[in-house]
Image (cartoon, coloured by chain):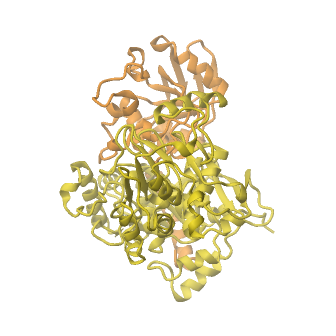
Amino acid sequence: MEKFTTLTGIAAPMPLVNIDTDMIIPKQFLKTIARTGLGKNLFDEMRYTLDGAEIPDFVLNQTAYRKSQILVAGDNFGCGSSREHAPWALLDFGIRCVIAASFADIFFNNCFKNGILPVVLPQVAIDHLMEDAKKGANARITVDLETQTVTASDGITFAFEVDAFKKHCLMNGLDDIGLTLEKVTAIDAYEAKTATLRPWA
Amino acid sequence: MTAPRTLYDKIWDDHVVHQAEDGTCLLYIDRHLVHEVTSPQAFEGLRVTGRKVRAPEKTIAVPDHNVPTTLDRANAATMTEDSRIQVEALDRNARDFGINYYPVSDVRQGIVHIVGPEQGWTLPGMTVVCGDSHTATHGAFGSLAHGIGTSEVEHVLATQTLIQRKARNMKVEITGSLRPGVTAKDITLTVIGETGTAGGTGHVIEYCGQAIRELSMEGRMTVCNMAIEGGARAGLIAPDEKTYAYCMGRPHAPKAAKWEAALAYWKTLYTDEGAHFDKHVTIRGEDIAPVVTWGTSPEDVLPITGVVPNPADFTGGKVEAVQRSLDYMGLKPGQKLSEIEIDTVFIGSCTNGRIEDLRAAAAILKGKKKKDGLRAMVVPGSGLVRAQAEEEGLAQIFIDAGFEWRLAGCSMCLAMNPDQLAPGERCAATSNRNFEGRQGRGGRTHLLSPAMAAAAAITGRLTDVRNMMGEMV
């Protein structure tokens, strides 16, 4: 997993609430057995016509936002399915950070496993960053995980909370499984204990 | 004396393997369900790192999302190449890693969340995960069950644990009894309508109250299935006599002395008097009506007697979302829901693909025909549900009514297989998501109960099933 420390980039405004995982990556693209290559189909049905032509109004098709690395989105981003293809598609497109007032749990977790930082901020901060993002390529938003801050192009800074363990893993690009396997004796002990306590499980 | 605990607290406490100072826990997983879409990258990860499946005996796989449901599906040509590759990858992974497997050719194959309970893999007090958000279904047994992403699938395969922080407790109480024509599906949709799709975010919901107790196990599965649509990490219902009766004798349920020991443990699985809930919602069972969704979020729900709402009646980001929904759905504010004409009826899915769902739909359809020109299909949740429906004569009722009688799978719930809506096609569906494009690009989905779906098939429009129940009682 790629580390996440700081990021300064173009932010695409997507004020729609409840952007679901079917919007982020429609099911026809889940038939892959790889993790990469999904970026071209990110937001596929909002981004392309049935014939595959780009829909000019869609934010990521606009010249200013084609190289976006950040999304500023409406409430409850990533609701719906558990498909990790959603963060895979975002990452493959080049998005490393999504900022919203709230996220669906599974999507939120999946982001951290893939080097993407989901940032939760109050609606008033989202409103400010949304306006900033609307300025296009001239406005660069900076996200600093170390200091836990998001800074708009006008210099206004918003602090955010992040789980300390998740932050540690993201800043160091750590593999969860490797970390857990360091606790294998605790797992062995748990299994031995429950084999007696709950032998049917 | 220990502080009073919720059901969620108790299951959580019994599964903590390790707790770090910051509260991050390693949680033991009793059952890991696997399907073909969210697992190939996880197995590949094991291969690359040379890791094994730690507990293959607790890992159960079944292909369901991609598989065709037409009767000719044994013919590989019915599947697109990419679907076939995914299913074959699951065949191979199940074999190579030695996990429990129900291949397409097995009569027990079906939707993973129907197969788990049916085979007795899902039991009270367990932790159950699957790379699928509707894992919440298994909460009906008083097991802590939730969806995970593919990285976490790999983590569970390798370690039989999950890194978790504890969620908050939320109580959803449905008091009193349901009125005739109102079902578990109406409960779960009504709750989401009340709380919103983010209402449960960060919480585990415990459903309780008389109306929940009065539900069958299958009804409880329908309620918990859609906890995720309310944003919750999981939904739970405390086990009771109905739960034990459902589990008893199933192939993987404990037997003899182990059964007695299990039963004694299961009887401790309830929320203690005075336990703390962070959030509380109460709905009167008598106030719940048969409902349908009108928009593109499961929270867009109203009684069938209602009208399409006006975007101006909403606030914040929802104004734009509702306008977008109505444009997508081709609906106008003020339009009566019962006058919305449909093209298709889909009965099935992990929400409503069990035998009682088919019985409820067949009871409405018996001796009747679907409207001419309407496309209608029933997709049983498993091969065993299909077999039982045939034995009970339900299949014949569906066939006589003009429905297609399919083989088991997820089918048109998410339209990864050939069962899809065309652009603009309007569907009354017993599934769980009405998102844009969910059932096929441009497809329009109205979520409802199996009985309501059957009623809609007869009239060709969204219909209040209560108007058709006169002759049944």
Q: Quadrant of residue B99?
A: bottom left
Left/right placement of residue B31 relative to residue B201 reads left
Residue found at x 55% / y 46%: B338
At horizontal 50% and vertical 46% (from top left) the residue drawn is B446
Q: Which of the pair A157/B313 is nearer the observer?
A: B313
Percent position (x, y) of residue B101?
34, 68
B294 sits left or right of B41 in the view: right
At horizontal 49% and vertical 83% (from top left) the residue drawn is: B249
Residue B36 drawn at (x, y percent): 34, 56
Q: Is residue A8 left or right of residue A47?
A: right
Q: Which chain is yellow?
A: B
Locate the C terminus of chain B and report the quarter of the image it occupies: bottom right
Question: Looking at the picture, how far across and down is residue B291, in whole percent?
Answer: 59, 51
In the displayed structure, would residue B346 be above or below residue A10? below
Tint of chain A: orange
Q: Where is the N terminus of chain B found, in terms of image quarters? A: bottom right
In the rendered picture of this protein, how many numbered marks are placed on residues? 0
| Residue B357 visible here | yes
Which of the two residues, B459 or B83, is positioned nearer the viewer here? B459
- Identified at 50% across, 45% down, the residue is A80
